[in-house]
Amino acid sequence: MLSKRMNYALAIFCALIMLSASMLAKTRVTKQAFGHTTDGTPVDIYSLADGKIEVRIMTYGGIVVSLRTPDRNGKLADVVLGHDSVDGYIPNPPYLGALIGRYGNRIAHGSFQLDGKTYSLPKNDGDNTLHGGIKGFNQVVWTGKEIKDGVELTYLSKDGEQGFPGNLTAIVRYTVSDGALRIEYSATTDKDTVVNLTNHSYFNLAGQGTGDILGHVLKIDASRFTPVDATLIPTGELKPVEGTPFDFRAPHSIGERINADDEQLRRGKGYDHNFVLDHTAGQLSEAAEVYEPTTGRILKVLTTEPGLQFYTGNFLDGTITGKEGRVYKPRYAFCLETQHFPDSPNHPSFPSTELKPGEKYHSVTVFQFSASSR
Ligand code: BGC
């Protein structure tokens, strides 16, 4: 039997071990100057490292500039497309890594009605408005503040900005812990408006710019998706994925059916569709999982959102040279944009994107990284 004194010493020893483990697990947050926008506004970059992954986020566009995660042998690689400096992101036609607002995805004919009033938005995608208009949240400098495990970004979008009603205060918190990047979005308004925020990171789990993502194996927990017209606006139908190339309820490689003889795939030039998640919206739960066989890297996506835009980088055309001089070609990355459905303001049957004064928009998405020894 251990003496009282030894018991006491053992208890102190265990407490010290636990304390140092928790200190090791703590996320290191550092901030650095990262250049200027074209009008001279200074931009900062925050680095969030938890000992497993390292994520760098800048105040311009709230852009995830790099995201380094280990493979099955512990070797780190940057798994998101992007640029080495702010200049590379001005402009940023594919929205690499950016925060998207006020309205992620498309609004048909740049127009919607709210409270009997018609609002007109700038059209930047043929006849439609894409990702908040000509100057969306991806092109503004956010105010950054260090918080526990991460950074809080704030942006006040003025009443009438890009045609949207109401002064909208948007707050996005990026935090890193235990190998996961958590994004928490919140917003309030002083007039009835619509809002749909997301992040537009382009992932390649084999390493950014190293090749296409067709060999990645994907699972999406969605029994239905929203088919689109020729301009990628939802028709309004919630179509069962059963028997279509959109059925990812069991894992399939992204490339397996991407060139199938399918009108929807032809319209998107590949996958560029919103999936209707099976989970209860509002509850943080798993929506998708991606496995990259050559490195063993796994990405799990959890969200409170009802939808997920799966986009296979079909419009990357080799004209953009990104980090480390890598050229971004079609299908060199995939996006999993958690969101409300595209064009919801024009589809009363879709979950509502309306926000009223006194209400709080709140949405959480987690990108969880790991590696399998398989
Ligand atoms: C859209 C694509 C679009 C891309 C812009 C995605 O969210 O669904 O159609 O081309 O963003 O980079």
Image (cartoon, rainbow, N blue to C red):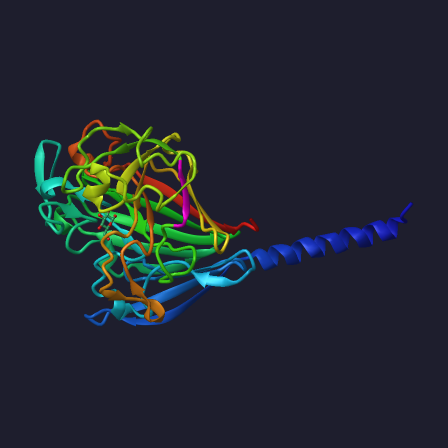
Residue 182 sits above or below residue 73 on the image: above
Classify residue 209 by image quadrant: bottom left
Check if residue 294 falls in the magenta segment. Answer: no
Residue 40 sits above or below residue 215 on the image: below
Magenta highlight range: 215-220
Q: Residue at x 42, y 55 (%)?
A: 205
- Quadrant, the N terminus: top right
Q: In this view, does 140 lie to the left or right of 296?
A: left
Check if residue 219 falls in the magenta segment. Answer: yes
Of residues 157 and 175, the one nearer the viewer is: 175
Q: In this view, does 82 lie to the left or right of 190?
A: right
Of residues 183 and 359, the one nearer the viewer is: 183
Residue occupying the far front of the picture: 261
Classify residue 320 by image quadrant: bottom left
Classify residue 302 by image quadrant: top left
Measured as percent of width and height from the top left, residue 267 is found at 19, 42
Measured as percent of width and height from the top left, residue 366 is found at 42, 46
Q: Main secondary structure of the magenta part?
A: strand
**Tag count:** 0
Q: Is residue 263 left or right of residue 325?
A: left
Measured as percent of width and height from the top left, residue 177 is found at 50, 52
Measured as percent of width and height from the top left, residue 22 is found at 61, 54
Q: Residue at x 18, y 51 (%)?
A: 158
